[in-house]
Structure formats: C-alpha cells, structure tokens
C-alpha cells in the first residue's frame, strides 16, 4: 500500500497542531510537541539504534516556519531553533497512525528517566549533534 500524500497542510498556531488532510477525508492532527519529540533528525534519533536523545521541555514549542522538501516531505523550523528534521509523507502518516502508542512510549521513557515533559533539556542531559 502506498502512503497517501496530504492534500492540505495547516499550521494551527493557537492549538499548536499540524493538521494534514487527505483525499479520503482522513485528517491527522499532530501536536507540535509530538513532532519535535519524534523529529527524524540525527539530533533526536542519533546515528543508529540506541543513540536516541530523549527530548524534554518541548511542551510549549511552536512551528515558526514550514518548508516543503521536493514533493515528498516538509521541514519545520521549531521555536527552540531545531530545523534539521525532514518529515516525509510516509513518516508523518506513520506518526499520525501510531500517535497514541508513540505518545504512551514517550511518556514511559520520560518516567523511566525520572523526567517530565517540562524538564529543561539542559537538566535532562540533552545535546545537539555536532555533525549537523
């Protein structure tokens, strides 16, 4: 099955949600914080399994710019300066389809680390990838 291409993309600043509309009527509402936490960038995902950096303190993050990347992806710039994640249509659909499971997994990882969604990254030991 081919992942559908969104027919509409709306950045809803008041609700802090990126809304993707599809031809079949499906609408995926992805909170900015969720997108920032699951950014496909090396800063977040690392360069391989086990190198992920747990993102914290992103509850109030906003999307301040959104660029298209060819005909297959978007690249948001977040208010915390993060802009290296390129979200393909496949990845966005995967995030939207698995949002409840992924959000629960994120909260479990936070709890296991003794952190919360509001813990500042500096206190969580977060770092930027020096290669990007």
Image: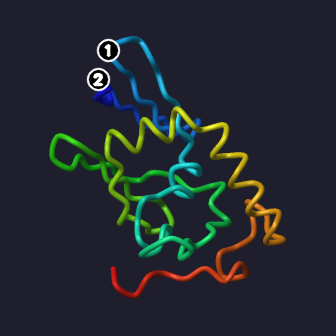
Going from the N terminus, do you reach mark 2 or mark 1 first?
2
Question: Quadrant location of residue 40?
Answer: bottom left
Which of the pair 14/55 is nearer the observer? 55
Judged left or right of residue 74, residue 71 is: left
User: Residue visible at 46% across and 58% down?
Assistant: 39
Circle 2 residue: 7
Mark 2: secondary structure: loop
User: Residue visible at 42% across and 41% down?
Assistant: 92
Disc 2 residue crowd, few under 14, some 14–19, many 20+, Cα 10 Å = few
Judged left or right of residue 56, residue 76 is: left
Question: Quadrant location of residue 131?
Answer: bottom left
Residue 128 against residue 116 in the figure, above or below: below
Circle 1 residue: 23
Give the residue at the far bottom of this rendering: 130
Q: Position of residue 36 (x, y in %)?
A: 52, 56
Residue 79 against residue 31 in the figure, above or below: below
Mark 1: secondary structure: loop
Q: Position of residue 109 (x, y in %)?
A: 73, 62
Quadrant, the N terminus: top left
Which of the pair 51/30 is nearer the observer? 51
Which mark, residue 86?
none
């Amino acid at each position: 099955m081919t992942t559908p291409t969104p027919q509409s993309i709306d950045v809803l600043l008041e609700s802090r949600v990126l809304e993707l509309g599809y031809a079949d009527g499906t609408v995926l509402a992805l909170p900015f914080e969720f997108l920032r936490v699951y950014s496909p960038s090396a800063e977040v995902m690392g360069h391989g399994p086990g190198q992920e950096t747990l993102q914290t303190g992103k509850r109030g993050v906003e999307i301040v710019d959104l660029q298209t990347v060819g005909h297959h992806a978007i690249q948001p710039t977040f208010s915390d300066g993060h802009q290296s994640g390129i979200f393909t249509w496949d990845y966005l659909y995967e995030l939207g389809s698995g949002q409840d499971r992924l959000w629960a997994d994120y909260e479990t990882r936070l709890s296991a680390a003794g952190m919360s969604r509001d813990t500042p990254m500096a206190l969580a030991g977060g770092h930027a990838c020096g290669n990007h």
